[in-house]
Image (cartoon, grey):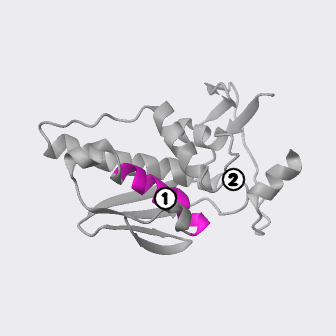
């Protein structure tokens, strides 16, 4: 019931999405490579890939995709500077970047190749909402705070999502033990 203060860090996630003629969803990341048919359910996929299959299927099954008919499938390549499993919100950052990449790709395709169908850009609120949906495929109790700070950057107050302006230089020191942990378990301990 209290407000939280969150800060973005100077690590980045870059996601490249590509339309394909094959009816597959292919995901490449430091976690490995996954290739599944577009008809597969995201629930059938290993947990670390679920959010990205969910996002790809959400787009492929959308009215925008069906109206524009851009391709049969998607390839998603995720490159991240954020260490995995150390509590820095890497999954949220990947969900936000993947959502922006896929929607941006289809928006560009629709607006360039279709005179009759225009795809509107996602607002920050829509980007956060869709990213939270994706993250809930692996963390059902996510608050959405990490997706919000990944979208807006800087420092924010949550859940109001108000920017916190600083009038002084602020540095964070983040120590990484190098030992991955289970975020869900850590959150349950706090609860």
Instruction: Categorize mark 2 by other alpha carbons within 10 Å: few (<14), some (14-19), many (20+).
Output: some
Query: On residue 52, which mark appears?
Result: 1
Instruction: Categorize mark 1 by other alpha carbons within 10 Å: few (<14), some (14-19), many (20+).
Output: many
Question: Residue visible at 36% across and 46% down?
Answer: 103
- Residue 32 vertical placement versus 135 (above, below): below
Question: Between 2 and 153, which is closer to the camera in this rendering?
Answer: 2
- Residue 36 vertical placement versus 42 (above, below): below
Q: Is residue 97 left or right of residue 156?
A: left
Q: Is residue 162 left or right of residue 190?
A: left
Which segment is the magenta one?
Answer: 46-59
Q: Nearer the viewer, mark 1 or mark 2?
A: 1
Q: Position of residue 147 (x, y in %)?
A: 59, 42
State the image quarter where residue 6 is shown.
top right
Farthest residue, direction left: 115
Question: Residue visible at 48% across and 55% down?
Answer: 54
Q: Position of residue 88 (x, y in %)?
A: 69, 53
Question: Between 125 and 71, which is closer to the camera in this rendering?
Answer: 71
Q: Position of residue 120 (x, y in %)?
A: 31, 34
Query: On residue 88, which mark appears?
Result: 2
Precedes in sequence: disc 1 or disc 2: 1
Q: Is residue 113 left or right of residue 151?
A: left
Q: Secondary structure at mark 1?
A: helix
């Amino acid at each position: 019931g209290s407000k939280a203060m969150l800060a973005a860090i100077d690590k980045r996630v870059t996601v490249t999405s590509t339309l394909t003629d094959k009816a597959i969803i292919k995901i490449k990341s430091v976690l490995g490579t996954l290739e599944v048919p577009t008809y597969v359910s995201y629930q059938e996929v290993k947990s670390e890939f679920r959010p990205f299959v969910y996002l790809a299927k959400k787009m492929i099954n959308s009215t925008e995709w069906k109206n524009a008919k851009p391709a049969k499938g998607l390839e998603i390549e995720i490159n991240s500077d954020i260490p995995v499993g150390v509590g820095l919100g890497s999954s949220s950052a990947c969900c936000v970047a993947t959502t922006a990449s896929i929607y941006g790709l289809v928006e560009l395709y629709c607006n360039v190749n279709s005179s009759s169908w225009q795809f509107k850009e996602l607002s920050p609120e829509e980007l956060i909402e869709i990213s939270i949906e994706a993250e809930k495929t692996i963390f059902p109790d996510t608050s959405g705070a990490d997706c919000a700070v990944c979208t807006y950057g800087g420092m924010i107050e949550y859940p109001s999502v108000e920017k916190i302006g600083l009038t002084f230089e602020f540095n964070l020191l983040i120590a990484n033990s190098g030992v991955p942990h289970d975020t869900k378990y850590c959150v349950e301990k706090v609860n």
